[in-house]
Each structure stands twice: as C-alpha cells, then as structure tokens.
Image: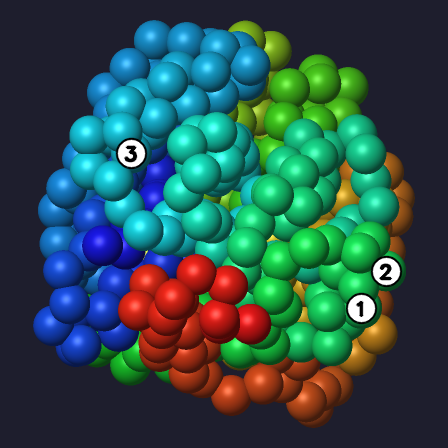
Amino acid sequence: MLAVLTGTRPGIIKFAPIVRALERRHVPFLLIHSGQHYSPEMDAVFFQELELPAPTYKLDVVRHFPLQGEQTAEMLRGIERILIDTHPELLLVGGDCNTHLAGALAARKLHVPIGHVEAGMRSGDWRMSEEHNRVIIDHISEYLFVHGPAATANLEREHVSGAIHEVGTTIVDAVEQNLPLARRRSAIQAHLGLESRAYLLATTHRAENVDDPATLQAILQGLAEAARRTELPIIFPIHPRTRRRLQELAVDLDAAAWQRIRCLPPLGYFDFLALLANAAVLLTDSGGAQQEAAVLRVPCVTLREVTEWQETLRLGANIAAGTSPERIAEAVVRMLEVPRTWPDPFGPAGAGAAIADIALQAIAAPAGVLA
C-alpha cells in the first residue's frame, strides 16, 4: 500500500492533486498527518475546502513542543510507529519542511522506499533549515519527482542514488483545479473593498525572518515603506508564528505607520488564491506562494536573499529583495512596472497524476525494476 505524508498548509495544497489522482484510480492509500500545523485556520480549513479525505492517522503531540528539534523528534517517533504498524510499500514525502524530514528518516530506518515530491530544489542558503531538509531527503529517497531540468541538474551534480522523474509541479495542478472554485466561492476581495491590481499582498512566516526581532522589524518597516511609496494598501494575513512574534515584540498594529497595512487572520486557500490572482504584487518568503504567483503571472518580491525557485528570477517574475526596508520598497516599485508576459516556468498541469502513476508502478514492479 502507498502512504502519503502531509502536515502543513503548503503540504496539504501540494499533495491535494496527488490524493485526488489516487482517489480517481480507486486504489487504497494511507494519508498520514504529522500534526506540524495544527490550528484550524492552518489545517482543517484546507482539508474542508479542497474536499480531501480525513487523514488515516494524525499525530497530536507536536503542538506541545516549541523547538524545531523537539518537533522533528516527536514526528519521527510517531511516524515510525505508524509505518511499523501499517507496513506501506512506499512513502511519499514532499518539499522541505520538518514533517517530511521526519517522515523520510523514519522510512529510511525501516527500509520503506521513499518518493520525494518537489525534489532537487536548492537555494544555496545553509542558514535555512529547509535547505538542510531538502538535501537530506533527496539523498535518502529512491524516487525523486522534479519539476524540470534545473532540479534534475542539481540532483545529477550531487550524484544522488534515486531515480529522477521530471513530472512538473503539483502547484500548477492545484492552481488550475482550484482557481475557478476560488473565484466562485470567495467574496473576500469585495468584502475588503479592493479593486483588482490596486493592492499588495504580503505573507511572512519563515523562522529566519520572524524569529529574529531585528529581521522581523526590518520587514515590517519595508512593508510600511512600500505602502507609502506606492500609495497602495497592503493586505497582510498573519501566520500564527508571526503573530506570536509580533505580540512578543509588542508591535502596535494600530500605529500610524501601519495605516495602509490591513492585518488579517490566516486565510483559507480559496480566499488567499482569489486575493493573489488579483494582487498588484506579492511580497512573501513562502516557496509555494512564489510558485503560485509565477503561474498566475503576479509579480513577486521575495523577502529572502535567495530562493530555490531560480526560474522565477530568470524570467523576471520575481526578485529576491532580502529584508532591508529600502530594498523591499524599491523592489515593489520596480515589480509594479514588470509586464506580466513571462512564460509559465513550470510547464503544464498533470504532475499529480504522473506522480500517482509512477508511485503505483513502483509498488507493483519487482524490486529494482522501475527506474
């Protein structure tokens, strides 16, 4: 039996096309939830909106451990026990978060083959725990599902031992499948009184940005300065991690400097997708949001010095501005003028179906036959 691991908001979105493909094929599979994201607005709402089946197994201990090492250890412990009890023939993990590192390590120790969705991505920034995670997962996986030649080249350069399959990215599937639903079901743009392309959309959640007080304050100053220079409001759905840090810093979100920044609670996928599709510019440190913006042809300013999605930079769809307030504001002004004519950097939809088919073939094939 095939097992699929998720546990974060981006992971739920990323794996939804694969889960749907498996359901269409009427094959049994296990859906394991690590519990890394556990608040309803970052978890349950996505299962509901995307009409995904409830997880077969869901861990409920991670919320009690604040440190990344503790969380990863608890997820490894819980996933290992599930794998021992269920004996899956292949575990699909995806991307670069701690959930998937824990799952891959648990599977490796138990000799359960691993398929890594979104393999081969590299930022070169070793300050990011995500970079460590993606490299480790790639080197212990039997099947590496990559979005295109650049990721393949990264893996070949590192001499990974797993079989590389260029399948595209499931983010394209997710956008194609869900944007029409978002446009029909979401009224958030009208509710907020926003004209299309007359607002900026911002998100930030990565540890290196929000856990360092100086960096977080610089990003906030950059948002305020971007809003001032462009005279556009910024819609800022605040991640729970970011909100905790803002509370610790006693940031006054009602201060005059924030008058153009509209802070919202975390949004459901349809609301976020609807706002993103009509935004003038996206400001984010999220890898998934960078992909979505490129697919939707929305200019992006990445709040990091580097990004693993190098194609978006080469096409002019994205600029890595770092966290300097001046650079953030300058980048937003610049990206407002960028023509939205770049080609799709990730190819056509169909990655979810391709990954499901290859995974099922791997289970059916004699050991070592599928490459």
Q: Where does the image place residue 263, in percent across and percent down from the top left?
A: 45, 38
State if disc 2 and disc 1 touch (CB < 8 Å).
yes
Q: Is residue 181 above or below residue 333?
A: below
Please tell me in which quadrant of the rendered image residue 364 appears: bottom left
Name the side, left or right, on which 255 lies relative to 322: left
Q: Which mark is residue 83?
A: 3
Secondary structure beneath dot 2 equals helix
Q: Where does the image place residue 308, in percent across and percent down from the top left?
A: 73, 55
Q: Residue at x 28, y 23 (%)?
A: 81
Q: Which mark is residue 157?
A: 2
Q: Counting other residues with Cα less than 10 Å from the Cα at mark 1, is it few (<14), some (14-19), or many (20 or more)?
A: few
Name the side, left or right, on which 132 lies relative to 38: right
The residue lying toward the viewer, choosing from 195 and 29, is 29
Name the side, left or right, on which 243 lies relative to 21: right
Specify the amino acid type for callout 2. Arg
Specify the amino acid type for callout 3. Leu
Q: Where does the image place residue 324, in percent across and percent down from the top left?
A: 85, 38
Q: Earlier in the sequence, mark 1 or mark 3?
A: 3
Q: Is residue 31 visible?
A: yes
Q: Counting other residues with Cα less than 10 Å from the Cα at mark 2, is it few (<14), some (14-19), or many (20 or more)?
A: few
Number of marks in the image? 3
The quarter of the rendered structure image containing the N terminus is: bottom left
Q: Counting other residues with Cα less than 10 Å from the Cα at mark 3, is it few (<14), some (14-19), or many (20 or more)?
A: some
Please tell me in which quadrant of the rendered image residue 175 appears: bottom left
Q: Residue at x 48, y 29 (%)?
A: 109
Q: Earlier in the sequence, mark 2 or mark 3?
A: 3
Specify the amino acid type for callout 1. Ala
Q: Which mark is residue 153?
A: 1
